[in-house]
Amino acid sequence: MRIEPSRRALVALPGLILARPAAAQEYPARPVRMVIGFPPGGGVDIVARLIAPRLAEALGQAFLVENRAGANGNIAMDAVVQAAPDGYTLFYGNVGNLAVTNALYRNLSFDTWRDFIPIAQTMESFSVIAVSADLPIRTLPELMAYARANPGRLNGASAGAGGPAHLALELFKRQFALDIVHVPYRGSAPAILDLAGGRVQMIIDGYSLMRSAVESSRVRVLAVTAGQRQVRKLAHADCAARHAPGGDGPAGRRAERGPRPTRSDRSHGPAGSGRPLPRSARGRSLLCG
């Protein structure tokens, strides 16, 4: 997915946190933890570290980014649920953490619908289908023909089993009856590094994370899972990008564990789609990137 932090979201985000009953105006009274379920260098980590200083400047307390990678974000989510229910521990992840986790995993220590409430979208995203430049492939039809001619010999990387990138790869394989071996990594950064080095052959992930590899001709983009506007943005790159099934999607929400708070205010724009952080909330917060 491509990472596009919304300027309106960055401006409105502190307002969402401050939009609470008058009795709760002292929040935050101490530093706030932002727990990330992915390793440093990936899209979620990058955006969290862009947002944290903005929040700290606006609210007068440090927002500390903490990486707890593993299990597609479940380790971090569990840590947030187990933390004191005082609103000082946030989880920052992707939309898949909220939308997919319950369906993929059994025996979770938390329920994403019960324990987390979306608050604000912080960025927009889209994905690209890309291959290593070592492959003699320049179009999406050529990729599918190559996979059919070489069943089981094409490796597809992802940021981790069960994540949005993995699900996109499996959907691509199923839709076109392709035998591609899934290779999960601990985050997008190492996956794209191996793609650029030719150790894996393809990936479906955010363009912004692989932009330097594309511009240096180590990775080639074949398709964009978004509208024509994004295809035009890639016109400068060494690719024959075409529109693939999919679309722009939200990739930034903040959520909180506990009862749904009263809507005391909403901001316009992407960040305004969520709920404020009230003092009375029993639960922890989740900030999805």
Image (cartoon, rainbow, N blue to C red):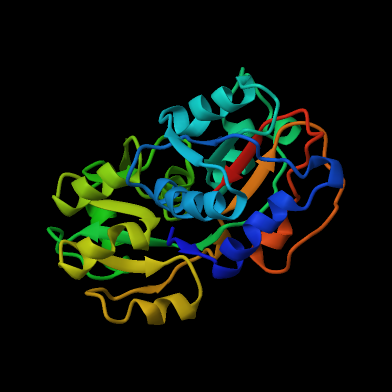
Work out whether residue 14 or residue 45 is closer to the camera in this orientation and state it: 14
Question: In the image, what residue occupies the spot 65% across and 62% down?
Answer: 12
Q: Position of residue 89 (x, y in %)?
A: 60, 32
**Towards the viewer: 279 or 158:** 279
Front position in the image: 98 or 277: 277
Give the residue drawn at x 52%, y 56%: 54
Q: Nearer the viewer, residue 88 or 8?
A: 88
Q: Is residue 235 left or right of residue 262?
A: left
Coordinates of residue 268 in the picture (x, y in percent): 73, 68
Specify whether 13 is left or right of 146: right
Image position, residue 149 (x, y; %)? 23, 53
Q: Residue at x 64, y 55 (%)?
A: 14
On the picture, is 190 further left or further right than 103?
A: left
Vertical relation: 202 (above or below) 38: below
What is the x, y in percent for residue 84? 66, 21
Q: Is residue 115 visible?
A: yes
Residue drawn at the location 13% of the way across and 50% of the way down: 197
